[in-house]
Image (tube, grey):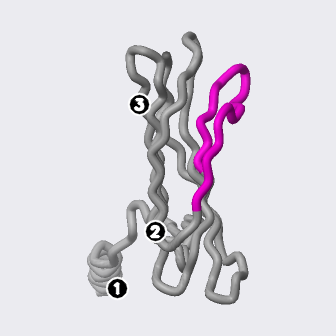
Amino acid sequence: MKFKRLVTIMLTLSVAVSLVAFPVAAVDYSDVVAPLYIGLEDVTADLAISSNGYANCSGSAYVANGYNATVVMELQQKNGTWKPIKRWSKSGGYVSMNESYQVSSKYYYRVAVTAKVYNSSGSLVESKTSYSGEVYY
C-alpha cells in the first residue's frame, strides 16, 4: 500500500514537472542601445568616381518641421587614416548637395555627411554622421 502510494506520488510529480515550460534560450534585448532622434529624420551619403577621376559626392539631410540643420559634406581620402580633402556646407530644413571634385588615383575615398540639428530657439539638439561606401580609384 505504501509502495503504491509512493509510486503514484512520483508519477504525479513527474507528469507535473514535464508540463512546466522552461525557456530553452531567452534573448535579452535590454542592453541594445539605439539612438532616438528628435528632429532628424534621415541623413544620407553617396559617392561615385568616374573613369576620368571625378568624385561625384552627394548627401542629404531631412529634419522635422520646426527644426533646422547645418550639413557638412566631406570627401575623405584614406592615406593610413581618413582625412578630409574637400568640404562643402549648407543649411536648411531639407538639405541636398551634389558636388564634384577631381581625385588622385590609387587611394580609397568616401563621403561623410554630418547634420547638426537645431530647434526653433537655435539650440543644438542632435547630430548624426553618415558615411558612403568606400570607393577605390
Q: Give the extent of the magenta segment.
A: 73-90
Report the predominant secondary structure element of the magenta stretch.
strand
**What mark, if any, has residue 2 been given in the picture?**
1
Q: Confirm whether residue 98 shows in the render.
A: yes
Q: Earlier in the sequence, mark 2 or mark 3?
A: 3
Identity of the residue drawn at 72% across and 81% down: 123
Give the vertical position of 63 relative to 129 (above or below): below
Kind of residue at badge 3: Ala
Q: Earlier in the sequence, mark 1 or mark 2?
A: 1
Q: Are marks 1 and 2 in contact (CB under 8 Å)?
A: no
Identity of the residue drawn at 42% across and 61% down: 25
Give the vertical position of 100 relative to 124 (above or below): above
* Residue picked out by circle 2: 94
- Left or right of 106? Residue 48 is left
- Left or right of 87? Residue 23 is left
Give the vertical position of 74 relative to 20 (above or below): above
**What mark, if any, has residue 48 been given in the picture?**
3
